[in-house]
Image (cartoon, coloured by chain):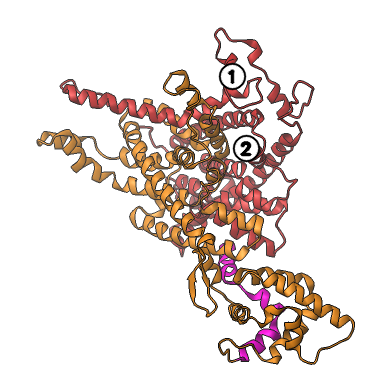
C-alpha cells in the first residue's frame, strides 16, 4: 500500500493543477505557434489566479515549476507582487498581456510558455526523466541534462558497480567458509557458525562504527601496518570515507547473507560424490569443477542475489563510510525526502530502484523459490 | 574433513592454504566487533588505541569507565571533555528503543503467528501471493519501504508520531515471525487440533492449550528476530520520528556523523553483548524445538 502510494507520487502532478486550473484550461485552447505568445485569455486567467490564489499552495506550485525550468520561481514571485499591488489599488489593467510583460519581461519569452506545457497534465513523467538525467527542451523533446547537472546516471552506475563488486567479494570469501562449515563435524561447525551468526545479529550501526574505527587514518589497521614497519608513519592509507571503505564494510556486513544459503545447500551434497569422481580418475580440481561446483549453484545464486539486492538498496553504510564520493542511490532518495523535499523525484528514484529489484526478485524466485529463505 | 593420509604434498599445501584462508575470513567477520571493546574502556577522547593501552603490564591510567558514565548520563567533571558532550540522550534513546521494540514485537508476533497458522493450512487460497506480500518488506530495500511509508503516513498524519514508527516496525518485523513460525509448523501434526476440538475445546482454547505450547520455540525466536529488527532499525526512525524522539540507532547515527566519541563505542559494546545473548537464546530454542518435534540433532 505505501509502495503503491509512492508509485502514484512519482507521476503525480495534481497539486499545480489545483493552483492554476483556469490558466491551464485556457492554455490548452491555445494552438501554440512557434515563437508566439499565448492569447489574452491565458494572461487574464493567470493574473486572476495569482491575485486570489492561496499563498502556500502557490509557493508549492512554484517549487514544482522550478523543476521544469529554473527561473519560474523568481518570475512568478515578482509578477504576483506587482499584481497584488495593482489589486490593492483596484486598478485592473486593460491588457493583461501588457501588464504582465510590464511586470517582468520574461513573460515575453516564449520558452517559459513552452515549459508550462509540461505541467498542464495531471500526470507527468518528468521525475523519471530527471532520475536518469533527462529533461525537456523548449519543444517538449526529451534531451539529456546539461553536463554539470548530471548526477544520477553516474550514481546509478556506481551503485550497480559497488553491488556487483560486493557480491563478487562475498562469493569469493563466502564459498570456502561455507564449504568448511558444511564439511566439518557438527560439533566444530556449530562453534564456528557463531563467527558467522554473531555479525549477523549485531546492529548494523555497530558494525559500521567498528569499521570506521578499524579503517581510519589513526585506526587499528593502519596502526598495525605502521607497527609492523610496512608503512611509514606519514604513509598511512586512507581507507575510509571513500569507495574502498564502502566496499570493505559492505562486504563484511553482507557476508553472512552469502554464507548461510551456501551452507544450507552444501550441507546436503553427499561427500561420496567427490570420492566417486576421484575414483573414476578425475584430478581433485577436475572433480571439484565438474561435480561439486554445479551442485552448489542454487546456493550461489540464492546468496548472490540476496547480497546483490541488499547491496543495491544500501544506504546507512555508504552514507557513513563512503564520504563524499561514496554516495549511492539510496543516499539521494533520503536526501530528496528529507532535505530538498522534492518528493516526486524521490519517489521516481525509488520506483526505478524497485523495478530493478523486482527483476532480480523474480529471477530469485525462478531459481530457488521464495520459500527457501533461511534465517540461520 | 580431515586430509586423507595418502594426500600428496601439493594437496597438503592447498589444504592448509584453504584452512588459512577460512581463518582469515572468520577473522575478517569478527575482528571489527572485538576491536571496539577495548577502545570503549579507554581514557582518550578519540576512538583509537593509545600507546599507553598497549603497554604490558597493563597501565591503569590508560583505562577507565568514564565514557560508560557519560553514556548513562552521569556528567561529573572527569567525564565531560571539550570534544565529547554529555547528556542523558543515550538513556532517553535506550528507553524509547526498548519501548518501540517491545510494542512492535508484541504486535508483530501476534499478527505473524496468526498469519503463519492461516498460511500453513493446506487449502488456503492465494497462498503464494499472500506469502509474497507478507515477505516483501524483507526483500524490498529498506530505503524504498521507508520512502513509501513516509509518503503514505504523511497522508494519514502519522508522521512524527510513535504510533507511526511502531506501525512501520510492525510491517518490517512481521515477515520474520511468519517465516520462523511457518518453519515450526512444518512438523506439526494437524490431527492434534482435530482431536482437541472433538474433545470439546473451542478454537481459542485449542490454540492456547494445544498449538501454542508446541510451536512456542518458533514464536519466541520469531519474536526475538522481530525485536532485533525493530531495535536496530534506523532508516525509518530517521524519516518518521521527530527530532526529540530519539532511539539508540538514531543517536548512534547522529554520533557518528557529528561527534566521533568513544561513547558510541560503549553503546556498541553493550549492543554486541545483547546480540551474543540473543544469539545464544535463539540457538538454544532451536535445539529445543527440534527435540520437541522429534527431529534428532545430527
Q: For label 1, count other residues whose C-alpha is less than 10 Å away and answer few (under 14), some (14-19) or many (20+).
A: some
Q: For label 2, count other residues whose C-alpha is less than 10 Å away and answer few (under 14), some (14-19) or many (20+).
A: some
The reply to whether residue B291 is visible in this rendering is yes
Up the image or down, B7 lies above or below B60; here it is: below
Disc 1: host chain: B
Residue A79 percent across, percent down from the top left: 76, 77
Decide which of A334, A130 is in the foreground and name it: A130
Q: Which residues are magenta?
A: A1-30
Q: Quadrant of the C terminus of chain B?
A: top left
Mark 2 residue element: helix
Colour that chain A carries in the picture: orange
In this rendering, do the residues under marks 2 and 1 share a single chain? yes
Up the image or down, B94 lies above or below A76; here it is: above
Disc 2: host chain: B
Residue B50 percent across, percent down from the top left: 59, 19
Q: Earlier in the sequence, mark 2 or mark 1?
A: 1
Q: Which residue is identified by label 1?
A: B50
Chain identifier of the red chain? B
Residue A150 percent across, percent down from the top left: 51, 60
For the point 70% across and 91% down, which residue is it?
A: A40
Q: Which residue is identified by label 2?
A: B256
Callout 2–callout 1 Cβ contact below 8 Å: no
Residue A94 percent across, percent down from the top left: 80, 92
Q: Based on the displayed image, in which of its 4 quarters is residue B273 positioned?
A: top right
Amino acid at each position: 500500500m505505501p509502495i503503491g502510494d509512492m508509485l502514484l507520487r512519482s507521476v503525480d502532478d495534481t497539486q499545480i493543477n489545483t493552483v492554476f486550473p483556469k490558466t491551464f484550461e485556457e492554455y490548452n485552447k491555445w494552438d501554440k505557434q512557434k515563437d508566439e505568445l499565448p492569447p489574452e485569455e491565458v494572461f487574464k486567467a493567470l493574473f486572476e489566479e495569482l491575485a486570489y490564489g492561496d499563498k502556500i499552495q502557490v509557493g508549492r506550485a512554484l517549487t514544482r515549476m522550478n523543476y521544469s525550468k529554473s527561473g519560474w520561481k523568481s518570475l512568478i514571485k515578482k509578477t504576483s507582487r506587482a499584481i497584488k499591488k495593482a489589486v490593492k489599488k483596484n486598478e485592473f489593467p486593460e491588457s493583461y498581456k501588457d501588464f504582465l510583460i510590464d511586470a517582468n519581461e520574461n513573460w515575453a519569452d516564449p520558452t517559459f510558455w513552452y515549459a508550462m506545457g509540461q505541467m498542464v497534465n495531471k500526470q507527468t513523467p518528468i521525475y523519471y526523466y530527471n532520475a536518469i538525467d533527462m529533461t525537456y527542451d523548449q519543444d517538449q523533446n526529451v534531451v539529456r541534462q546539461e553536463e554539470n547537472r548530471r548526477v544520477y546516471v553516474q550514481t546509478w552506475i556506481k551503485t550497480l558497480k559497488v553491488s556487483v563488486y560486493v557480491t563478487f567479494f562475498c562469493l569469493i570469501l563466502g564459498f570456502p567458509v561455507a564449504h568448511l562449515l558444511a564439511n566439518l563435524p557438527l560439533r566444530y561447525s556449530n562453534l564456528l557458525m557463531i563467527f558467522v551468526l554473531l555479525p549477523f545479529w549485531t546492529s548494523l550501526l555497530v558494525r559500521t562504527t567498528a569499521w570506521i574505527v578499524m579503517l581510519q587514518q589513526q585506526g587499528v589497521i593502519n596502526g598495525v601496518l605502521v607497527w609492523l614497519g610496512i608503512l611509514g608513519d606519514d604513509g598511512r592509507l586512507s581507507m575510509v570515507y571513500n569507495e574502498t571503505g564502502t566496499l570493505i564494510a559492505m562486504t563484511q556486513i553482507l557476508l553472512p547473507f552469502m554464507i548461510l544459503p551456501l551452507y544450507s545447500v552444501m550441507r546436503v551434497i553427499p561427500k561420496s560424490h567427490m570420492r566417486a569422481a576421484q575414483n573414476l580418475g578425475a584430478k581433485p580440481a577436475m572433480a571439484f569443477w565438474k561435480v561439486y561446483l554445479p551442485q552448489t549453484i542454487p546456493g550461489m545464486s540464492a546468496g548472490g542475489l540476496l547480497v546483490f539486492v541488499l547491496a543495491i538498496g544500501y544506504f546507512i553504510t555508504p552514507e557513513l563510510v563512503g564520504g563524499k564520493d561514496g554516495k549511492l542511490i539510496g543516499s539521494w532518495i533520503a536526501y530528496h525526502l528529507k532535505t530538498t523535499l522534492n518528493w516526486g523525484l524521490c519517489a521516481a528514484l525509488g520506483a526505478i530502484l524497485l523495478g530493478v529489484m523486482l527483476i532480480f526478485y523474480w529471477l530469485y524466485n525462478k531459481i530457488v523459490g521464495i520459500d527457501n529463505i533461511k534465517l540461520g | 574433513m580431515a586430509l586423507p593420509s595418502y594426500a600428496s604434498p601439493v594437496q597438503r599445501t592447498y589444504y592448509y592454504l584453504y584452512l588459512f584462508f577460512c581463518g582469515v575470513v572468520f577473522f575478517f567477520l569478527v575482528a571489527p566487533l572485538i576491536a571496539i571493546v577495548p577502545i570503549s574502556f579507554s581514557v582518550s577522547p578519540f576512538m583509537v588505541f593509545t600507546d599507553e593501552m598497549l603497554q604490558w603490564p597493563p597501565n591503569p591510567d590508560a583505562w577507565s569507565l568514564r565514557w560508560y558514565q557519560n553514556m548513562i548520563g552521569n556528567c561529573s567533571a572527569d567525564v565531560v571533555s571539550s570534544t565529547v558532550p554529555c547528556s542523558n540522550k543515550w538513556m532517553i534513546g535506550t528507553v524509547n528503543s526498548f519501548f518501540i521494540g517491545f510494542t512492535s514485537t508484541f504486535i508483530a508476533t501476534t499478527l505473524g503467528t496468526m498469519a503463519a497458522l492461516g498460511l500453513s493450512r493446506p487449502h488456503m487460497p492465494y497462498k503464494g501471493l499472500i506469502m509474497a506480500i507478507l515477505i516483501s518488506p524483507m526483500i524490498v530495500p529498506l530505503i524504498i519501504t521507508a520512502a513509501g511509508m513516509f509518503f503514505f503516513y504523511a497522508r494519514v498524519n502519522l508522521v512524527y508520531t510513535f504510533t507511526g514508527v511502531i506501525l512501520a516496525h510492525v510491517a518490517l518485523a512481521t515477515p520474520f515471525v511468519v517465516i520462523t513460525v511457518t518453519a515450526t509448523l512444518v512438523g506439526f501434526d494437524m490431527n492434534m487440533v482435530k482431536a482437541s476440538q472433538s474433545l470439546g475445546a473451542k478454537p481459542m482454547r485449542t490454540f492456547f492449550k494445544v498449538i501454542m505450547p508446541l510451536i512456542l520455540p518458533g514464536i519466541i525466536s520469531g519474536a526475538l528476530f522481530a525485536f532485533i529488527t525493530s531495535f536496530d532499525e534506523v532508516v525509518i526512525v530517521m524519516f518518521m520520528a521527530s527530532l526529540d524522539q530519539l532511539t539508540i540507532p538514531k543517536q548512534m547515527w547522529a554520533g557518528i556523523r557529528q561527534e566521533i566519541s568513544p561513547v558510541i563505542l560503549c553503546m556498541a559494546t553493550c549492543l554486541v553483548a545483547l546480540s551474543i545473548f540473543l544469539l545464544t537464546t535463539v540457538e538454544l530454542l532451536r535445539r529445543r524445538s527440534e527435540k520437541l518435534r522429534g527431529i534428532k540433532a545430527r
